[in-house]
Amino acid sequence: MSANKEREVPVRIIYRKKGHGHGHHGGAWKVAFADFMTAMFAMFLVLWLINQSSDVKSAIAGYFQDPLGRSDEFGSSIVPGEGAQAAIVRPMQQADVTDMRMNKMQVMAQRLTKDIMAAPELKGVMDKIEIKMTDEGLQIELLEDSTGVFFESGSASPSWRGRGVLAILGQELGQLPNPIVIAGYTDARPYHRADGYTNWELSADRANTARRILQLNGVGEHQVVQIRGLADRELHVPDDPYAPSNRRVSITMKFDATTEADSTAAPGEGGTAG
């Protein structure tokens, strides 16, 4: 009897409590959440892209057309001769190039205004500086008043404010390779010296002084393609030939990145007249 008791295996009864919570729903919600986040990312990417400049858009489009930059070698595959050939990059239209160059110059114009306004020693001269886009490119005009803002009266010697403004212009304009044309102007008031020095020489000398300061502060040696001395032939205020603002120096950064043969003056034709 005792032997049988030793062989008996105790019976264990396990009571399991039934939970009342939600059952397992699987991972479908993770897929839906991932799709939602992808859609949100795509939306914000599109919003970011439409607010970028045209040159940024062109760069991004070029990357997706040829991610590896090997379209001229093997196409889109890293293995020579294999994989799908990269799509031919569409050449930029002239209108796209013009928009890109204009955008760069508009950004530069904004920086110039900001830099000049931030210089405490130049406070109060912004009303004498005109920065605008023209058919030729970005034009900056330094307008004089009756006291002489940028140049000493009747002289090609720059004032300290003139040097400061031209230094800032040189630092900014030197960041682009575009050609630059500098022109000097006077009002219609006759200016004669005993040695025959007239408004023609004065306007040309002021333009040349501006060139030297620009090149000392970042403008490339070959970037200035023409110096013009126009005296009173193109008045800023045609209705008032004697207005002080007719005395000015104009600096134009042209859209064209290459120098045209007919845009440079031949030796001995520096823009002055006797």
Image: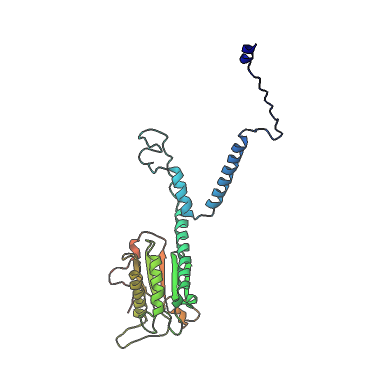
Taking depth in this image into account, of 115 and 99 the one nearest to the observer is 115
Instruction: Reply above or below: 85 against 3.
Output: below
Where is residue 120? Give x, y as percent.
Answer: 46, 76
Res 248 seen here: yes
Direction from residue 151 to residue 117 in the image, left or right: right
Left or right placement of residue 138 versus residue 195 in this view: right
Image spot of residue 87 (x, y percent): 43, 40
Q: Residue 126, image x and y in percent?
A: 48, 75
Q: Position of residue 185 (x, y in %)?
A: 40, 77
Q: Residue at x 44, y 46 (%)?
A: 63
Instruction: Report the side of 45 relative to 98 (left or right).
Output: right
The one of 80 and 274 positioned closer to us in this rendering: 80
Vertical position of residue 31 compared to residue 98: above or below? above
Quarter where residue 4 is shown? top right
How many numbered markers are drawn?
0
Quarter containing the N terminus: top right
Q: Residue at (36%, 72%) from the top-left corner?
A: 228
Residue at the limit of the structure toward the left, as seen here: 267
Question: In the picture, residue 222 is in which quadrant?
Answer: bottom left
- Colouring scheme applied when the structure was drawn: rainbow
At 56% across and 51% down in the image, what residue appears? 47
Pick out the residue farthest to the right.
20
- Which of the pair 265/38 is nearer the observer? 38
Residue ranking furthest to the front: 2
Most extreme residue toward the bottom is 194
Image quadrant occupied by the C terminus: bottom left
Is 196 displayed left or right of 143 in the figure? Answer: left
Q: Is residue 271 visible to the viewer in this orientation of the structure?
A: no
Quadrant of res 33: top right
Residue 155's place in the image compared with 108, above or below, is below
